[in-house]
Amino acid sequence: MLFAQAPSAIVAAPVSTTVARLDKFELNVSFNAGYTNPYDYDDITVRGIFTAPGGRKDTVDGFFMQDYTLNTTNGSVAASGPGGFKIRFTPNETGAWQYTVQVSNTLGTATAAAQSFQCNASTAKGFVRKNGTNYLNFDNGEQYVPVGQNQAWHQNNIYLNYKSWLQKLSDNKANIIRIWQAVWGFGIEWKNGTDSYTGLKRYKQTSAYYTDWLMEECKSKGVYIMFCVNHHGMVSSNVNPNWPESPYNAVNGGPCANTWDFFSNTIAKNLHKNRLRYIVARWGYSQSVMSWELFNEVDWTDNFATHKNAVKDWHIEMAGYLKSIDVNKHLVTTSYANNVFDPNTWSSPSVDFTQTHNYIGSPNVENALASGCSDYVTQYNKPVLNGEFGIDAGSISLSTIDPNGIYIHNSTWATAFSGAMGAGMSWWWDTYIDPQNLYRHYKPLSEFIATLALKNDNYKKTTSAVTGGGTADLSLTPGIGFSLAGASAFTIDASGAVTPSAAQLSNYLFGNVFNTQFRSPPTFTVTYPVAGQFKVITGSSTGTAAKVNIYLDGTSVLAQDAAINSTYSINVPAGAHTIKADNLGTDWINIANYTFTNIGSPLNTYILKSADSSKAAGWVHNKKYNWQYVKDNGVPTAVSGATVIIHGMRNGSYMVQFTDCTTGMVTGTATATTVSNNLVITLPSIAWDVAITAVFGGATPVIDLTSAKQLKIYPNPVENVKLFLEYDLTTTSKVSIDLFDLAGRKVAVIFYGKQLPGHQLIEWNVMENKIKAGFYIVRFSIGNETGSKKIIISP
């Protein structure tokens, strides 16, 4: 660097003058200019101005970086060269692009001579986008449904850990991870002298280099990243506190006397914007970034309730700033630990999708996760994702209580069919999922989702009911953390339907002395078809001197000191009743669930239907097949003789398909019909769960084409190895016969070629072509005519 010198002598050297569309175009930039800090955009700014073949202009920031050589045996890095400025850009049009480079400092601006590069066609999917549905898609229109997990930081070796984890995710068709820029992980800015950090506006280059590597590794594995920029501990002196070491802390020379000043102090906000600018300049080119996440669980920052409005304003300002500097317009989100925070932030147009986080000690944790996602879709009318979930098991290890990941399986399937944009993302990737090798739960779900046109058909949650199969206990799993409940009055009918959803219940019963601002004891108006019980089941933690108080029809029938992991129950006669659960003790008690015996079905259903009501898909679950029941009792008895009724469907006949959720294999097919817009499906015996699809038009006849008389397809269903296609051609014709799945994807070519007039018989071996059981469409193209026929291939 040269001090007191305006920019001059700019040289912009492209890594290559030819690049594929939506791939990385990179420049190495050198120049003469005076500056003191290469990471400070107020001190020195490098920009690339790119003109598309169609005339559009994009301006992107450059960034300073130190390059390294990566040792792929042990994951270590060694500095390579002196470091310099780079510009990264992603062209989205084919043809000749023009560009120039500008360099500015406090003394002036210089512009290099224009140059060009050629952008060639590619099959890249592009960046992840919103659309008018609750789902996401790539630039090419293909839907993107996230299925994956948190991988916020490494365990012991950032390269070797992520290399292994990403390979296992990819092998099981998972497609998302969530990372944090934490000081002990991918962080780039922290207190000077802490683990090679050098303070504010001085970005740790080893962390940045590993992030570079991660972007490209994820690209090669088809995995996308929710990139969390800040975590709550950075601005907290109480919950996972890192504030004492923060470079923003005035004690360490920063601009903030208190943690909450981070959100309102102008200097602090400008420092943060400088870091955002660097992040976007260095990684904004990458399609591997699914979204930027401004904060993890920001409500854990100090005195959040008092400074809630300032936090909201900060989010809206930073989200708007990101959108102003990110030419690729990555999605923007944030997160809260408690689902009731914060409507004003979630409602902002600058926040593209909402998030829920849930840690619950209930056996059926999936109920709260799915209900929470459904509620957010309804409340905010934008996509939602459960960004973290887990079992609140106290000091007991997950490997002990759920070694096979039952709660992960149940939670991912339930959230995927809750109306959310994807499946919930489990925590404890390094101490539980990887050691127990639980990645296998992602593959069947991903494969099943791939058969559904969730985005194109605009699937949304619909109501459904189960009849038959016996009666069961209704267990309500609270969905709101240490805060005020979303509702205090709930109605439960004889079928077990709950209004509003149980996700509006708090995980805590708050007492009469402390935390009284959160008191909202729930009241249930409930109809028992037969006599039963009401149970309050406590979780693994409590405050001081809590009590459990239960009222039946306004009369106190139970008042006991509360203990953790305990059950408090009362008898309830058949009929309509009002039940209230309260805590008249000193402080809170954690609630695992509220249980009503002999109400509802032994099955839970999570069903979506298409916007035109002609298709449905979902997950049906045996309630007892949960981590707690299996741990205590073993595998439950299968539920037989049940029927699911899906409301609001188009009248007519449907093809129904059943899929095993642990193997992804189709296990059966059936036909079903609607009665007054209610689709009635007889279910198979369900030990754990089953995935179902229903598609309108099960009785479609064979189309008799003019040029192909007596066209027949048999047998249907195909129960043996061969499928026969028989017809008479009236003229010499070009014939194309293809097999499609119900999502419209070509699965196989049955025949292609020219045929002479006369009788035709085609034998096609289903087994040799490795066609899975299920429903398919045989599509004919004979001359200028087309036709199709739905067929069933039996297991």
Image: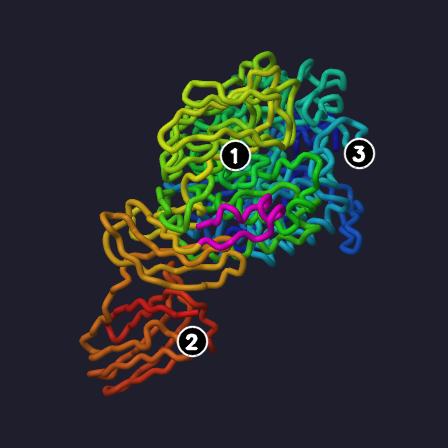
Instruction: Choose between 359 and 7: the one closer to the eye.
Output: 359
Q: How far apart, in angstroms, are the residues tagged by discs 2 and 1?
A: 44 Å
Q: Which mark is residue 356?
A: 1
Q: Residue at x 55, y 14 (%)?
A: 516
| Res. 115 in view | no
Image height of 62 relative to 553, above or below: below
Q: Residue at x 35, y 62 (%)?
A: 670
Structural crowding at the residue carrying mark 2, measured as other residues with C-alpha within 10 Å and reported as few (<14), some (14–19) or many (≥20): some
The kind of secondary structure element at disc 2 is loop
Q: Nearer the viewer, mark 3 or mark 2?
A: 2
From this viewpoint, which residue is outermost toward the left? 706
Q: Residue at x 43, y 52 (%)?
A: 142
Q: How far apart, in angstroms, are the residues tagged by discs 3 and 2?
A: 60 Å
Please identify the quarter of the rendering in which residue 363 is found.
top right
Q: Amino acid at mark 1?
A: Thr
Q: How far apart, in angstroms, are the residues tagged by discs 3 and 1?
A: 32 Å
Q: Earlier in the sequence, mark 2 or mark 1?
A: 1
Residue assigned mark 3: 195
> Range of the magenta residues?
620-639
Percent position of residue 575, x then y? 36, 31
Percent position of residue 125, x then y? 48, 53
Horizontally, residue 98 falls left or right of residue 574, namely: right
Q: Earlier in the sequence, mark 3 or mark 2?
A: 3
Where's the N terminus, which quadrant? Answer: top right
Q: Amino acid at mark 3?
A: Asp
Where's the C terminus, which quadrant? Answer: bottom left
The kind of secondary structure element at disc 1 is strand
Structural crowding at the residue carrying mark 3, measured as other residues with C-alpha within 10 Å and reported as few (<14), some (14–19) or many (≥20): few
